[in-house]
Amino acid sequence: MLWRIGNGKSTEIWKDKWLPIPTTYKPQESVRFLHESTKVSFLIDECTSQWKRDLVTSIFTKKEAESILKIPISPLSKPDSLFWRCTSSGQFTVTSAYHLLNELEDQARGQSSNSRTHQAPWTSLWNLNLPNATKTFLWRACLNALPTQANLKVRKVVEDSACPICLHPSETIEHTMWECPSARDVWSLSSRKFHKASTLSPSFAKKLESLVASKETEELLLFAVTAWYLWKRRNEVVLQGHLTHPSSAVSQSQQLVEDLQKLPVSKKVMALKQQTSPPWEAPPQGKFKVNWDASVDEVSCKVGVGAVLRDWNSKVLATLRMEQDLFPDPHMAEAFAAL
């Protein structure tokens, strides 16, 4: 459980887990001249609902200070709250606990150093023009969280772990993606490089990580989409008893990659159309109109706000321009601008 900072009055700086820095979530290298029971509220300016930037940078290391200044502070002075760090909603689930247990077991076996290296490529992966279903599939495959027959047998859902296509004794993720003859047929028609990789039977996560590191976007898209079609094809065998021909799976994958590569162009055209805003209209007699806008600076974790107040004669009565230390989320920036 981690603390989500509201007004900082319930969270202790040195003892509680509140920093967004795995794996300790606590300050580690800072100069501790403050009392050990000092609350996080000591670092927050109650009048402005902002971090005391000078104080934070003087107490904490550069890495810790940057992480602290990125934490949004509610202007409503909400109390601190505990949340479950393993889900995006902050709510506990059995599935998330299962993944956490696997993570802790890996660390106990001395593999914690490798776990950090596998996290790095995800930032690049989430930014790709891929369907959300494909991204989720890749994430679950790398965590060995797909319902293969081998995984289902471990969880005592099924008694037989054999591959539903080739009847190999154990259907693992690597078997589904590489070792199964039906998968090799698909890779052989898709790409010579991928066909070579399938004969070496590498870890799925390592193969994906190497593609992300190579920065070859087209090749990464083809790999991701083909792998997803392989899993979809396998599920059709289990649920419908139908196995799609390898050439059909390859052609569908290649067509989707071509469509995805065209997508940024259409998005750009739509964005340009949306930027053509209608002309400003004056409010009714005796009324006032406020227009505002917000911008985000992801590097500095700041939000900029601009506002203008005009009357029914289009006369400017007041303007406002300000910046605020805030998590750089567009929706949050617009809400703060309205506030």
Image (cartoon, rainbow, N blue to C red):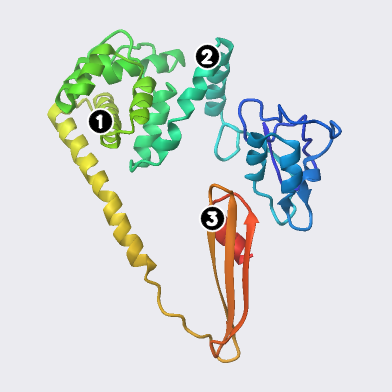
Relative image position of residue 252 (x, y in whole percent): 19, 37
Q: Amino acid at mark 1?
A: Thr
Q: Of the residues under marks 2 and 1, which one precedes in the sequence? A: 2
Q: Residues within 10 Å of mark 2 (few under 14, many from 20)?
A: few
Q: Residues within 10 Å of mark 1 (few under 14, many from 20)?
A: many
Residue underneath mark 3: 296
Mark number displayed over residue 111: 2
Q: Is residue 305 above or below residue 232?
A: below
Q: Amino acid at mark 2?
A: Gln
Relative image position of residue 47 (x, y in whole percent): 78, 58
Quadrant the N terminus occupies: top right
Q: Is residue 62 left or right of residue 200?
A: right
- Is residue 83 at all visible to an observer of this figure? no
Q: Is residue 245 above or below residue 44?
A: above
Q: Quadrant of residue 159?
A: top left
Mark number displayed over residue 162: none
Distance (Cα) linking label 2 and label 1 = 29 Å
Q: Residues within 10 Å of mark 3 (few under 14, many from 20)?
A: many
